[in-house]
Image (cartoon, rainbow, N blue to C red):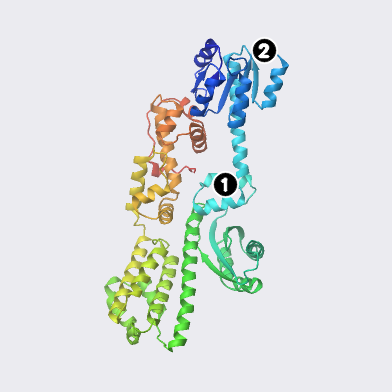
Amino acid sequence: MIIVDDEIAIRENIRSSVDWEKEGFHYCGDAPDGEMALPLIEEWAPDILITDIKMPFMDGLELASIIRAQKPEIKIIIMSGHDEFRYAQEAIRLGVTEYCLKPVSAAELLQILHQVSQKMDEEEQRMMSLAMTKEKLLADLCGGLIGTSDAIDSAKKLSLPLSARFYAIAIVDIRLHDESQHSEQVLNRILHVLETACSVHAELLAYIRSRTELVLLLKSNSKDSINTCLEALRGHTRLELEQQFNCSIILGIGSMQERLQGIHISYLEADEDKYITRLTLQNKASLRGIQLHEKINVFLDRRQFLEFLKLGSPQLRDSFVQEFASPLKSVDWHTSTYGFYLLNDLTLESFRMANQLFRMGADADENIRNLQQMIESIESWEHCKQYLCTLLDQLWQRRAASSGKYSDVIDQVKSYVSQQYNNEQVSLKTISAHVRISSSHLSKIFSQETGQTITEYLTQVRINKAKELLKTTSNKTFEVAYKVGYNDPHYFSNIFKKTTGCTPKEFRSQGVMPFHEPPSDQIEEPMYD
């Protein structure tokens, strides 16, 4: 808040008569007239302006008019010693928040300020409620951008049934054969059909992610219900949709999850599964064309390879590959592309199975591209065997990773956050750059290993540190906010209240005591983005 009054005694009295921090306000400063106040308002960006009407150079009504036009979010309280109706009329016309007559006591001013503060909080809640839609909520859940409590609260406001025992994500990629069709209309019609078909087995919440994609959130208290729905989606439902709407459909399906935060993991897996499925279909089409053109018929027992990938050991790798690759001896790697497509097909099928079984590998697109480059460089049967050994090794590493061997990465993330939590610029992007892992993959493994998103963990560390500072120092609220990485004290107070259930002021009033918070990774209270 800022005070503008040409009487210095009034400014000093207002400034010194109230413990502003204790009351939950930050007193920015004051000015003797509107003209001198304008640059200060620009610099300090206050939430509340308290101004006298009668002042030299620029009076309070002129100042209010300028502020209302330039910074309409600022709440204006007009003080006047002139009990004249025309001033009140003009103040109302300008949209000031409160109008009071001098002399005003500290208690009266505080009452007005608390009323204004409450209005601001109500407006903020209303704006948040209006800003959140079903589509945005689902997209935020899939993107790992919203905490559990916030998601439940938003769903309640939207009257959206969100809670269930099990969740799974499916991504439906739809490519229309007739390009003259309006894609958005077709997607909405397909979505309506899917909602009707899935409602028999599970509840479906969905949104349109792009002009070619639908994201389906399936939820139920029964795993079997969701699996039945997914099987139908893979089978007859997909075929019926393709025939009815003259399109091609590619599905990506994520794993079953038991927590709302797991939706993010299932979404990443579904996106990866969709990517592998698309590559597989493209490769199979090329393989059939080459087979017909070159009249080659080499058979590789993919089931045997996948079974060895699942249960085999590194000690038996070389002997297995020697026997498995024997049909490829007849391939001429210099004149035919058949062997390359055959290995590519095997690679994609192996990644698909690994994605279903292990669910913890590195980014599929990058790994597959690297392996495809290796396939392109094969010049002999010996090179082919070396490639198959490399493929097995990489996928076994993926299997090992699923056993929770990401502790080093998680420790690096936590160490970095503990050092940089006071930097407002810290984000998933900066953290992923520090640990040298892509944002999507880091987000997935951190959520899988810790049960919370990186944003939630960062918020948790910051709020715990803020608790410590509030209990053990005399720092003002805005100073505490700055020290834990929030440059906006008002936003910090909102986050603090959401997280702890009380304001920083209320938390501090509980009494100063030694700080004995448990380590942040042992705290189970929900955090917020």
Q: Position of residue 201 (x, y in %)?
A: 62, 64
Instruction: Tell me if residue 138 comes above or below residue 285 in the rendering.
Output: above
- Element type at marker 2? loop
- Left or right of 463? Residue 134 is right
Residue 391: give its label.
none
Residue 45 visible in the shown view: yes
For badge 1, the amino acid type reads Ile
Identify the mark at residue 152; answer none if there is no mark: 1
Q: Residues within 10 Å of mark 2 (few under 14, many from 20)?
A: few
Looking at the picture, how far across and down is residue 136, in whole percent?
58, 50
Residue density around tag 1, few if under 14, some if 14–19, many if 20 or more, within 10 Å: some
Extreme bottom residue here?
A: 295
Which residue is at a point 67% across and 12% down the rendered structure image?
82
Residue 82 - label: 2
Q: Position of residue 255 (x, y in %)?
A: 49, 62
Tell me if residue 428 comes above or below residue 191 in the rendering: above
- Residue 4 quadrant: top right
Of the residues tagged 2 and 1, which is closer to the observer?
2
- Rendering quarter of residue 448: bottom left
Amino acid beneath label 2: His
Left or right, 503 with respect to 514, comes to right
Q: CA distance from mark 2 to mark 1?
A: 51 Å
**Image location (x, y in percent) of residue 17:** 52, 14
Q: Which sits earlier in the primary sequence, circle 2 or circle 1?
A: 2
Q: How many marks?
A: 2
